[in-house]
Amino acid sequence: MENSVMGLTPYLTMSDAKAAIEFYQKAFNAKEITRHAAPGGDKLMHVHMDINGSALMFSDDFPEFMGGKSRTPQAFGGTPVVLHLHVDNGQETWDRAVAAGVTVIMPFKEQFWGDLYGQLVDPFGHQWSIGQSVKKPTEAEIQEGAEVAFERGKEKAVHQ
């Protein structure tokens, strides 16, 4: 079956699925695979996109089928889920996402685990991280870096 998806695929709820398609195309060079409109309206009941060889699926919010409750990140006051996009061209991907209109929550820079890495939130409230492997630290170097980073995080939290 063509365009079948195997494995684990994120399926998101959007406040505006049509705008999300356009945004993901600009921000992440996503390719639209499938789009199905809901009967009798403007909303999309299913979207399948390809981002860097991985499937991302989503639909508009349909609170009328969820006991009247919205399922968007905005309705929940944010999201505990991070979608990680690992690429060979991290800075280029990061710059394109920023230009498309994301909100940066963790700057893109080299991290103690050997990746260029940063986090952002898209206009629909979904949190993303972008990573690019640049070196392979030893387990001891990772542990040492984690201790420093966690200590800095504690100090920062105390002063806020």
Image: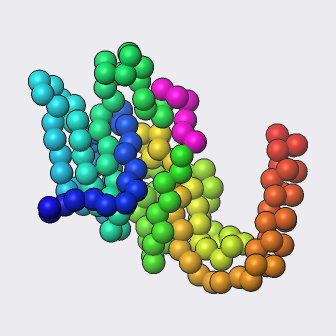
Q: Which of 129/4 is in front? A: 4
Q: Residue 25's quadrant in the figure?
A: bottom left
The image shows residue 20 at horizontal and vertical percentages of 32, 44
Residue at image point 18% right, 51% down: 34
Q: Which residue lies furthest to the left in this view?
A: 40
Question: Would you say 60 lies left or right of 32 here?
Answer: right
Q: What stretch is highlighted in magenta?
A: 75-80
Q: Which of 118/55 is in front? A: 55
Q: Which of 140/21 is in front? A: 140
Question: Would you say 104 lies left or right of 113 here?
Answer: left
The image shows residue 29 at horizontal and vertical percentages of 31, 63
Q: Which colour scheme is used?
A: rainbow
Q: Is residue 37 magenta?
A: no
Please determine whether, in this image, residue 82 is positioned above or below residue 91.
above
Residue at image point 81% right, 58% down: 150
Please determine whether, in this image, residue 29 is positioned above or below residue 39.
below
Question: Would you say 16 lies left or right of 116 here?
Answer: left
From this viewpoint, is residue 103 visible? no
Q: Residue 60's quadrant in the figure?
A: top left
Q: Quadrant of the N terminus?
A: bottom left
The image shows residue 124 at horizontal and vertical percentages of 42, 39
The image shows residue 11 at horizontal and vertical percentages of 37, 45
From this viewpoint, is residue 159 visible? yes
Residue at image point 84% right, 65% down: 148
Please determine whether, in this image, residue 1 is positioned above or below residue 45.
below
Q: In which quarter of the image is the C terminus?
A: top right
Secondary structure mostly seen in the magenta stretch: loop
Q: Residue 36's quadrant in the figure?
A: top left
Q: Which of 66/155 is in front? A: 66
